[in-house]
Amino acid sequence: MSRYTSVTASDLDQMLDAIGVGSVEELFADIPASLRLGRPLAGLGEGLSEQEVYGELRALAQRNVSCEEEISFLGAGMYDHYVPALVEAIISRSEFLTPYTPYQPEISQGGLQSMFEYQTAICELTGLPISNASVYDGPSAVAAAGYVAKHATGRSRFVVSRGVHPHAIETLRTMAHGYGMEVSLAEVLDGATRLPELDDDVAAIVLAQPNFLGAVEELAPLAAAAREAGALTICACDPIPLALLRSPGEDGVDIAVGEGQTLGNRLDFGGPSFGFFAVTEPLVRRLPGRLAGETRDVDGRRGFVLTLQTREQHIRREKATSNICTAQALNALAGVIYLSWLGCRGLVELAELLVQRTAYARSRIGALDGVELLHARPVVREFAVSLDAPVERVLARCRAQGVHPGYPLERTDPSLRGGLLIAITEQRTRAQIDRLVEVLGAAVAAEREGVAA
């Protein structure tokens, strides 16, 4: 049968007969009717020819606008950083582009070595001794870290800062619901997390560095409070600011996770990217995902293997502490290539550049009439302001000028009505920042004065 030919009615009858089932519906008999769609998927008609599909996709693509065509100050988790040509040139090589999980180390040394080098880079960034070979993305890394904390402590509740990315909070809630765990939120006041008193049912506190409002948190006292209560500290980190900030490991964090998109991965409509995950040594056997290790062969030559596989589902089945079998290794490889391209000094210089440009933008925008800073804490790449005007209307005015000024915070938190999160990367020049100041200031003024758009 051709790989491009659909299953015919005759093929279907033969397969059902071979497994002793009378119909496709019978295969799904154990799924409650309330959970079934009960109708064809919307939009699926008779089907289109290849030429018609191409035309449809081309028309859809022409509706998209990239950051290269308009000026974007959007961030909130995904950022427009420059990706050097070197990254795509290497990850496009067939040795890296096509392999799957390297169960056979003798033919997978290149892939295993890239995983090992990636893990080493993440350990250096986070200040923690052990990293896995990556997970799916930042939010799922937070949820997986909650799973680790639950089993390490045997406790039933997470205390999560409101400064953690809303998508990560929702992902953690989903995981926690499945295990009968509770998620409590800690308030963010003036840009900083304020922990409540921690009871003996708290498995972990979950923080972000910098937090969702762009503010740099003081992690050490928060981690110390968690340790005193017998809880772990999970921190969702932005990797580039870690070049300047104290590492999570130095501040007493037990599990450092985060979104790796900023490391050599383009925006690509929000994905795919990768999540990174690093832990203290006592947690290594609960660490999810692949773990590449360095060893010596019988002749004393350096080699690489997948290690501690007894944690994983292909060996321990239902008793496994990890069920992550796809490591986003290609995206993680892009991350370690990017870090190698920058080098230690280059990463610091990039972070310093972000601080300088963000400080310039923050001072100019904060001085506009009708605009106030949401907090005065230090920031690296991103900062939050409050507009004395309807945010969505201001955004529409700015977009009409080819400028996307930022992310409206009330979309994820109704209490932050009027809030706008503005991200600055090395892609945004001083002239573009000045353009943002001009367009945003005019839009806010027009809305305050009731001028028709």
Image: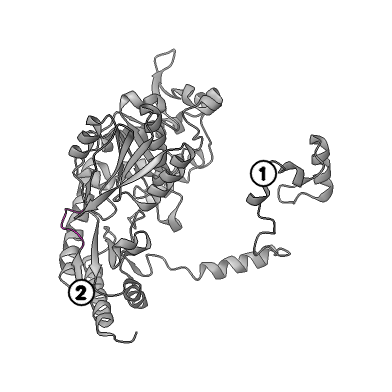
- For the N terminus, the image quarter is top right
Image location (x, y in percent) of residue 242: 24, 43
Q: Residue at x 30, y 66 (%)?
A: 417
Of the residues under marks 1 and 2, which one precedes in the sequence? 1
Residue 394 sits inside the magenta stretch: no
Q: Quadrant of residue 369?
A: bottom left
Relative image position of residue 110 (x, y in whole percent): 45, 32
Q: Position of residue 342 (x, y in %)?
A: 27, 45
Stretch of the chain drawn in magenta: 374-379
Residue sitting at x 49%, y 25%: 105
Is disc 1 in contact with disc 2, using a CB cutoff of under 8 Å? no
Q: Is residue 1 visible?
A: no
Residue 381, given in percent of the width and then of the height, sits at 24, 55
Instruction: Tell me where residue 365 sits by quadrant.
Output: bottom left
Rendered residue at 35%/26% (across/down): 283
* Amino acid type, residue under disc 2 in the picture: Gly
In the figure, residue 364 lies in which quadrant? bottom left
- Nearest-to-viewer mark from 1 and 2: 1
Does the rendering let one see residue 297?
yes
Q: How many marks?
A: 2
Instruction: Say left or right for 431 vs 52.
Output: left
Marks 1 and 2 sit apart, C-alpha to C-alpha, by: 55 Å
Position of 418 with respect to 295 (left or right) is left
Circle 2 sits in a helix, a strand or a loop, which is it? loop
Q: Secondary structure at mark 1?
A: loop
Q: Residues within 10 Å of mark 2 (few under 14, many from 20)?
A: some
Q: Which mark is residue 370?
A: 2
Residue wearing tag 1: 31
Using a 10 Å C-alpha cutoff, classify the residue at mark 1 as few (fewer than 14 neighbours), some (14 to 19) or many (20 or more). Answer: few
